[in-house]
Amino acid sequence: MKSQSFILLLLVALMSCGCASYPVNPPLNEVDTTTGYRFKNLAMNPGNGDDTFIILALSGGGTRAAAFSYGAIQELNTIKIPGSGASLLDEVDIISSVSGGSFASAYYGLYGKERFLADFPRDVLSRKIQNAIILRILAPWNWWHLGSWYYGRSDLADSYYGKKIFNNATFKELPRQRPFIMMNSTDIGIGARFSFIQDHFDRLCSDMDQVSISRGVTASSAFPVAFTPLTFKNYPKEKCGYKTPIWLSNAREYDLEVNASRYDRALDWASYEDSGRSYMHLSDGGLSDNLGLRGPVLGLIWNASPLSIHKKFNDGKIKRVVIIAVDAQPKQPSKLDRSSHPPGIFNVLNAASSTPMENYSSDSIEQVRSYIETWNSQFDDNDEKSPIKFYFSRVAFEAEKDPELRRDLQEIKTKLQLPKKAVKLLIDAGGRLLRQSPDFQNLRRDLGIMQ
C-alpha cells in the first residue's frame, strides 16, 4: 500500500512537470531616471557627507564571505569620527557585492545598520541554509517544480531566502538613502556583469522595484552546477521608451582601436536591444567579478557610469575616496596535480569556474591601484597637490601574520553554512585585518581618530 501511494505521488509529480514557472520580472511602463533604485536618487543619511566617500566591496565565498564581511562592517561601526558622533560605517556610500557577500549587503540595505549588527549572525550566519535547500530539493512535493523546464534549483533557493531571511521584500522596499546596495551577477549569455540597479534593468525595460530582493541575492550567488541560472525577461524597447545612450553609439563607432574595454562594454550593453534576445540568464557574480569592485571602479573613471562618482570630483566636495575590498577567497595550492589520473568531471567544472574568478580578482585589484597611481601622477608631474586623497585597503586572509590562523582561515570551505567556531574565526579576522591595513591606519590618522 505504501509503495502504491509513493507511485501515485510520483505520477502526479511527473504529470505536473512543465506547469511550474519562475517569477517573471515585470515590464517597465516608462524609463524615468528620476525614479527607481539609482545612486543619484538616494539621499544621504545622518552622519554621511561627500567629503569622505567610502566604497565597500564584498567578495564571494558563501557563508565564509558573509561572516568575513560582517567582521569588517562591525569594525567600521566601532570607529567614531571626531566631532560628528557618526561612525565610519555611517559614512559608507556604496556597498557592492557578489555571491556570499550579497547576503550581507542585501540584509544591511533592507533592514538597516542596527538590525544588521544585532541580528545578521542569527538570521544568516548561524542558519543551516545548505541543509534547508537540500531538504527542499529532496522533498517529493517539490519535484513537480523541479521537473519543469521553467523552474530550477535557484528558484527553490530564491523562495527559501525570500521567506526565511528577507521577508519577501521587493527592491521598492529598499530605503532611498545611502549606502547604495549594488548586488552583482553575471549575464552568462555574454559573460558580462549585470547589477541589480534600475539603470541596468532599464536595458530590459523592466521595473526592478517589483523584483524580490531575494532574487537579486540568489542570482548573485548562483554558483554554476550547484545552482541553476535565473531567467529574466528582456522586453521590447518601444514598450518603455528606452533610447540608446549617446556614449554607446560613439563607442561602437570609434573605440575599437582606441578604447577596447569601452568598445566591448558598448557591445554588451547594445546586446539587450537585440529583438532576438528575449531572455537573460543570470549566474554567480563571481564569474565576471569576484570582488564586487569593477562596478564602483568604473564609476570612478567613467563619466557615463550609473554611479556618476567621477562627476562628483568636479564639484570639489570629495576630499577622500576610501575603497575597502573584503576578499574572502582562500589561496590554496591545487591538489589536482598530485596524481597522474585525469581530474573527474566535477573537479574540472570547479576549476573552470573558480580559477577565472581568482584571476579576475587579481586583475580588479591591479585596476584599482593603476587608477590611483594614474590619478596621483597627473599632479606629481605638475608639482601640484591632488585635491583628493585615495585609501585602498584589501582585507584578505593572506594578510594574517599568524601562519596558523592564516592556514585555518584558508581551509574554511565555500559552503552556505559553517560551524560556529569557523564563523567566529571569520568575524574576528574581518575586523582585525581591516584594523591592520596600512591605508586604513593612514585614514584613521588623517581623520584624527585615536588608536
Image: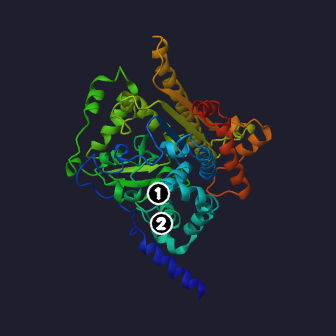
The structure residue drawn at horizontal position 23% and vertical position 47%, both measured from the top left corner, is 237
Q: Is residue 162 above or below residue 369?
A: below
| Residue sitting nearer the eye, 316 or 23 | 316
Q: Is residue 3 above or below residue 216?
A: below
Residue farthest to the bottom, as pictured: 1
Indicate the position of residue 145 as horizontal and vertical percent values. Answer: 46, 68
Q: Is residue 331 visible?
A: no
Reading the image, the residue beneath label 1 is 110
How much space separates mark 2 and mark 1, taking CA atoms?
Answer: 10 Å
Reading the image, the residue beneath label 2 is 167
The structure residue drawn at horizontal position 59% and vertical position 33%, both measured from the top left corner, is 448
Q: Are marks 2 and 1 in contact (CB under 8 Å)?
A: yes
Q: Earlier in the sequence, mark 2 or mark 1?
A: 1
Is 227 on the left or on the right of 435, as rendered?
Answer: left
User: For the residue labelled by badge 1, is the local secondary structure a helix, a strand or a loop?
Assistant: helix
Which three-letter amino acid code belongs to the residue tagged 2?
A: Asn
| Residue sitting nearer the eye, 272 or 168 | 168
